[in-house]
Image: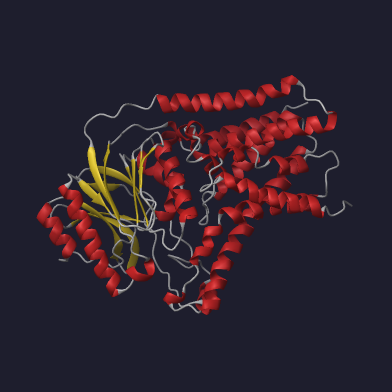
């Protein structure tokens, strides 16, 4: 029976918190290469602890890692403006944050346990292969859950663009696998050194080759991006900066008419071919053929507007992006597919609990997964807020013919950490699909991102801003767009064969 290693577990928890600085907003992406090293070494020590201690160690590392990365969840408080009592507001913010921290701990605890069961009798190379595969498979599965946000690949965004370009081959999972593999090699070298106080030179070769090859291939993909040629599009974006607690009131609606109407006119005067507004820029149910300050301005100027609003169809309400054509009429509608639990819908079984804590009523419906947003300027890819975390939503639309990305979000009441992570997600989506991305938010960060992941412009936060950007439609299809997450299948088969035929 193993003793309970209190100090070691505390240090693993602390290291998880430190390693989370690899995520935005700190974005110390080199920490991502060593984030798992102490946990890996603990699991693979000669006298392996009991399985439940290993699993708990992984859990604690994960709670430290994800709690710090997700501390922006606490910005949910205060909710008193919605009629939620202060005590309940604090309980909701803390409860959501703690629940997500625990989920992160369960993820890493599961990996630690499965890796320990795999790695006890495996030689070094097979142990690394197994650890990488288990993490990659778990992440690929969890990326389809309704609460997905922090892929391990996000530790490299937006700073390490060369490595992020591997996403063009097989999406974020391939980037994750490479980063976990680097962790594994470093951990195994540390284990060898601690056991023998020497480190054979040949052990340096595999990790160096991996780092050089991964970044070299990513650099080649980045450098080989096609040169943009005409036709080009001048897309304007408006960052409204109307706090949610204000914009849901009558005064806020009037302010929205004014902000977005004036911003639209200014961008048209600057030469915009179309203008993009944030998620729920007008938090009303849009009525067909209505006449209002926006539709009058559009009919006068003749330039399309992409408006974040709500659409009702057959007694279902959808968070939507609509195209208002040059006459101010609805030309097309995109209905948000990935909704925010508790914010936009209440998961089954939680209705009673939510009603006891607050008067919130979230009843939006999800749109169909096979949508393609047609516009007067061509087909576009759309991501509304939370959808930025789901790479396959962008891949599917690119495969259907989307030629550039329109990303829109509210981001209020959250502060800079969430905004920076959201921006980093969109950097990865632009690279993976090889598309220009225009991002309009309510409070920041709005941005324009090139297909190489370079941020060409980024707004200040919590200010009203307009910006006119030049982008280029693209019809190319990356290997990820064509084949999806194929590498994880290859990795599973390779690992199975290596295990089957290992001595």
Q: Is residue 58 visible?
A: no
Q: Is residue 223 visible?
A: yes
Identity of the residue drawn at 65% across and 38% down: 34
Q: Quadrant of the C terminus?
A: top right
Q: In the displayed structure, would residue 301 be above or below residue 226?
A: below
Identity of the residue drawn at 60% across and 48% down: 20
**In front of the other: 245 or 1:** 245
Q: In the displayed structure, would residue 349 be above or below residue 309?
A: below
**In front of the other: 125 or 408:** 408
**Based on the displayed image, in which of its 4 quarters is residue 208 positioned?**
top right
Percent across and percent down for residue 283 are 31, 66
The answer to whether residue 472 is left or right of residue 447 is left
**In front of the other: 207 or 148:** 207
**Based on the displayed image, in which of its 4 quarters is residue 94 positioned?**
bottom right
Please count the marks in the image. 0
The colouring scheme, among rainbow, by chain, secondary structure or one colour, is secondary structure
**Based on the displayed image, in which of its 4 quarters is residue 190 positioned?**
top right
Percent across and percent down for residue 310 are 31, 63
**Given the current orientation, which residue lies at the most extreme left position?**
300
**Given the current orientation, which residue lies at the most extreme top position?**
202
Percent across and percent down for residue 144 are 51, 50
The answer to whether residue 340 is left or right of residue 14 is left
Q: In the displayed structure, would residue 127 be above or below residue 421?
A: above
**In front of the other: 193 or 144:** 193
Percent across and percent down for residue 82 are 42, 75
């Amino acid at each position: 029976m193993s003793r309970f290693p209190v100090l070691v577990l505390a240090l693993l928890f602390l290291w998880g918190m430190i390693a989370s600085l690899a995520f935005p907003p700190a974005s110390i992406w080199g920490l991502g290469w060593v984030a798992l090293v102490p946990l890996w070494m603990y699991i693979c020590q000669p006298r392996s602890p009991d399985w439940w201690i290993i699993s708990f160690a992984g859990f604690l590392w994960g709670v430290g890692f994800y709690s710090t990365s997700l501390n922006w969840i606490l910005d949910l408080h205060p909710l008193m403006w919605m009629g939620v009592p202060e005590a309940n507001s604090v309980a909701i913010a803390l409860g959501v944050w703690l629940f997500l921290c625990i989920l992160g701990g369960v993820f890493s605890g599961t990996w630690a346990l499965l890796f320990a069961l795999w790695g006890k009798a495996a030689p070094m190379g097979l142990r690394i292969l197994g650890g990488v595969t288990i993490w990659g498979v778990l992440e690929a599965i969890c990326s389809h859950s309704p609460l997905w946000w922090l892929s391990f690949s996000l530790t490299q965004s937006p700073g390490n663009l060369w490595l992020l370009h591997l996403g063009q081959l097989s999406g974020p999972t391939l980037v994750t696998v490479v980063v976990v593999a680097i962790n594994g090699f470093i951990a195994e070298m540390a284990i060898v050194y601690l056991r023998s106080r020497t480190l054979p030179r040949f052990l340096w070769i595999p990790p160096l080759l991996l780092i050089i090859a991964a970044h070299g291939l990513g650099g080649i993909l980045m450098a080989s991006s096609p040169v943009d040629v005409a036709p080009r599009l001048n897309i304007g974006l408006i960052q409204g900066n109307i706090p949610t607690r204000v914009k849901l009131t009558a005064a806020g609606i009037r302010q929205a008419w004014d902000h977005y109407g004036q911003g639209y006119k200014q961008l048209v005067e600057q030469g915009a071919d179309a203008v993009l507004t944030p998620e729920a820029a007008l938090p009303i149910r849009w009525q067909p053929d209505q006449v209002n300050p926006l539709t009058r301005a559009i009919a006068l100027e003749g330039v399309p507007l992409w408006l974040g609003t709500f659409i009702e169809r057959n007694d279902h309400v959808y968070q939507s992006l609509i195209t208002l054509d040059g006459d101010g009429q609805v030309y097309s509608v995109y209905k948000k597919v990935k909704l925010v639990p508790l914010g936009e819908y209440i998961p089954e079984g939680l209705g009673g609990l939510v009603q006891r804590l607050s008067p919130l009523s979230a009843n939006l419906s999800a749109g169909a997964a096979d949508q393609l947003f047609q516009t007067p300027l061509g087909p576009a890819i759309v991501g509304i807020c939370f959808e930025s975390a789901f790479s396959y939503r962008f891949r599917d639309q690119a495969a259907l013919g989307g030629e550039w990305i329109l990303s829109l979000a509210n981001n209020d009441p959250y502060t800079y950490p969430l905004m920076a992570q959201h921006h980093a997600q969109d950097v990865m989506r632009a690279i993976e699909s090889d598309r220009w991305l225009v991002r309009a938010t309510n409070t920041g960060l709005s941005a324009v991102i090139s297909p190489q992941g370079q941020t060409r412009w980024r707004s200040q936060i919590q200010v009203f801003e307009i910006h006119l950007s030049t982008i280029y439609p693209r019809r190319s299809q990356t290997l990820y767009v064509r084949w999806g997450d194929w590498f994880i299948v290859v990795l599973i088969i390779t690992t199975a064969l290596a295990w089957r035929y290992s001595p």
